[in-house]
Image: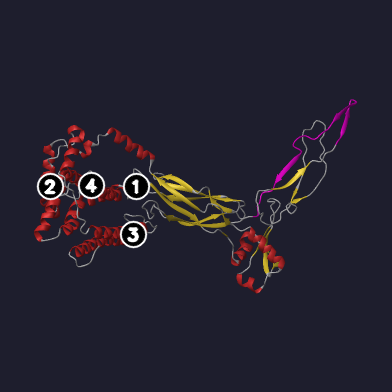
């Protein structure tokens, strides 16, 4: 570009026996920011000249070689820089301790620039939970192109971890000195007042001597009030526009996602221990004697498993009450074979049979109880039978929610349980009854009763529940399960209220207080 390079031409003499010669090209300092920093701006071309030299009456031809054109690249040094991260995302192990994040300054490094930054929570939480909150400002000095941000990562030794948070940079700004600091430069820094003015403002200059031959530095200081009193001329407006083009700007990656993963060393250690350890020794029992002793022993409900050296706690009053309320069931389930028998298959089969027996017992007991107090079968079914068979599912979902990182296992258990109850609990029973009565030459008919109203009411409440779960998938709550205390209590209260409303409306429709369909 003609504004950046000075055109020139001439000749370069190559002496006898020499292999190279130099050529000079002038580069102009325009004081403006190039639109495309680092682009090729000038080219030096060697003209096609023919010459001849005679040595010992032998004529030697001189010709141009390849390449005959040299490209000269002019790098932009007038821009304050473009600030960006190296990439969009970065992975880090939770055992790293302190993570260093680089901030790059590209396409110019002129002047001192201040760049604000801060961390933003994602699925990983700050305040010392997963990482330490970090914020502040980076100060890039003149010609400084790289700065680092240090973030402390908390190691909580999770076996599987995949959480993220963000760090973002704000708008950069040039460091501008006030007029008071300029007066101090006159005394301490060797700056002198030139006596000249720019738009009515004094210009200070620092002259460098021969032992430090660098260009003179000229600084102009102006207050905002003075700028308003003295409007800029067209020339000054153009100079201001050129200066604004050189101001610092943000680049492509202004928000870096940091993904915290589990410690590979810790995970490998746990995997090796699991391979070498028989898990049956951890969760299993060796004999019926051990099971019965554990069933009739009152134990503390708050055992401190983390502290191996901690003293054994004595059972509280609440522990004794719960023990006497549940001792029958403890002794009953102590008859289940120990896990050492038949590689655990005996325990599995007997446990399934006992659960089925108890479910049938609870269902029949609830039906007789409802009949005794005069409740209709539909009301007994939605209140006592459903409650008795769903309590185990409720506790199973609670355990799954605590042990799993996500809500898939706990919510999937509910849908799976409903599928088993409908397709197996009802489907198999009705199929057997239909086959039996068909063999007797009769039809097996099931009266719908209030089923249509109950299913419609249940479907409406199910859509409301799904809407609540979808609404909870917001950053301020965090997901379907857990979250802030207020959100947890409101969600739990709403679901309990829906269950009570379902029982209320179903009972009112069964006793003809409201009309169903």
Report the Cα–Cα distance between label 4 and label 3: 31 Å
**Which circle marks residue 156 in the picture?**
1
Depth check, mark 4 against mark 1: the one in front is 4
Give the Cα distance between marks 3 and 1.
31 Å
Q: Is residue 72 magenta?
A: yes
**Between marks 1 and 2, how big is the CA–CA gap?**
38 Å
Colour option used: secondary structure
Badge 2 or badge 3: first in the primary sequence: 2
Residue 53 % position (x, y): 87, 31
What residue did someone put label 3 on? 468
Of circles 1 and 2, the one toward us is 2
Q: Is residue 192 visible?
A: no
Label 1 environment density (alpha carbons within 10 Å; few <14, some 14–19, many ≥20): few
What are the residue bounds of the magenta stretch? 50-78
The residue mark sitting in front, 4 or 3, is 4
Disc marking residue 427: 4
SS category of the residue bearing label 2: helix
Tell me which numbered mark, 4 or 3, is placed earlier along the sequence: 4
Can you see residue 6? Answer: yes
Distance from label 4 to label 1 (Cα)? 48 Å
Specify whether residue 17 is painted magenta: no
Is residue 102 depicted above or below 60 in this figure? Answer: below
CB atoms of marks 4 and 3 within 8 Å: no
Horizontally, residue 296 falls left or right of residue 469, namely: left
The residue at which mark 2 appears reads as: 329
Query: Residue 321, position in %: x, y?
Result: 12, 54
Q: Callout 3: few (<14), some (14-19), or many (20+) C-alpha neighbours within 10 Å?
A: some
The image position of residue 489, as x and y in percent, is 28, 61
Mark 3 or mark 1: name the one nearer the start of the chain: 1
Closer to the observer: label 4 or label 2? 4
């Amino acid at each position: 570009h003609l504004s950046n390079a000075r055109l020139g031409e001439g000749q370069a003499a190559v002496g006898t026996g020499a292999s190279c010669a130099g050529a000079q090209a002038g580069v102009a300092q325009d004081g403006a920011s190039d639109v495309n920093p680092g682009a090729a701006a000038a080219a030096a071309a060697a003209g096609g000249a023919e010459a001849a030299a005679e040595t010992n009456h032998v004529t030697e031809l001189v010709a141009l070689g390849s390449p005959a054109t040299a490209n000269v690249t002019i790098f932009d040094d007038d821009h304050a820089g473009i600030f960006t991260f190296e990439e969009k995302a970065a992975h880090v192990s939770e055992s790293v301790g302190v993570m260093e994040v680089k901030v790059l300054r590209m396409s110019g490094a002129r002047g001192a620039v201040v760049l604000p930054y801060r961390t933003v929570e994602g699925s990983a939480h700050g305040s010392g939970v997963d990482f330490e909150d970090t914020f502040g400002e980076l100060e890039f000095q003149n010609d400084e192109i790289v700065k680092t941000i240090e973030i402390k990562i908390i190691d909580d030794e999770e076996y599987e971890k995949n959480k993220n948070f963000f760090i973002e940079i704000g708008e950069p700004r040039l460091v501008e000195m006030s007029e008071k600091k300029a007066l101090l430069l006159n005394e301490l820094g060797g700056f002198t007042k030139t006596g000249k003015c720019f738009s009515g403002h004094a210009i200070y200059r620092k002259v460098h001597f021969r032992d430090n031959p660098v260009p003179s530095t000229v600084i102009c200081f102006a207050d905002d009030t003075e700028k308003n009193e003295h409007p800029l001329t067209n020339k000054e407006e153009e100079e201001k526009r050129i200066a604004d083009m050189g101001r610092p700007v943000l680049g492509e990656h202004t928000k870096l996602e940091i993904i915290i993963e589990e410690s590979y060393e810790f995970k490998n250690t746990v995997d090796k221990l699991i391979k070498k350890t028989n898990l049956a020794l951890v969760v299993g029992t060796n004999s019926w004697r051990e099971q019965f002793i554990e069933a009739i022993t009152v134990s503390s409900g708050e055992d401190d498993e983390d502290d191996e050296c901690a003293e054994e706690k004595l059972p509280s009053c609440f522990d004794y009450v719960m023990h006497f309320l549940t001792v029958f069931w403890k002794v009953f389930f102590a008859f289940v074979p120990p896990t050492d028998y038949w590689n655990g298959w005996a325990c599995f089969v007997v446990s399934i049979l006992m659960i089925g027996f108890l479910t049938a017992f609870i269902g029949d007991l609830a039906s007789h109880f409802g009949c005794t107090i005069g409740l209709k079968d539909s009301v007994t079914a939605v209140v006592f039978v459903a409650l008795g068979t769903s309590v185990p599912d409720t506790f199973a979902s609670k355990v799954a929610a605590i042990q799993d990182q996500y809500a898939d296992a706990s919510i999937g258990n509910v849908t799976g349980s409903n599928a088993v109850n409908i397709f197996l609990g009802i489907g198999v029973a009705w199929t057997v009854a239909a086959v039996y009565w068909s063999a007797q030459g009769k039809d097996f008919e099931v009266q719908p009763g209030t089923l249509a109203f109950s299913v419609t009411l249940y479907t409406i409440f199910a859509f409301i529940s799904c809407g609540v779960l979808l609404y909870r998938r917001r950053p301020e709550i965090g997901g379907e399960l857990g979250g802030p205390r207020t959100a947890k209590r409101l969600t739990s209260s709403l679901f309990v209220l829906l269950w009570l409303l379902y029982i209320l409306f179903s009972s009112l429709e069964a006793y003809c207080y409201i009309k169903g369909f």
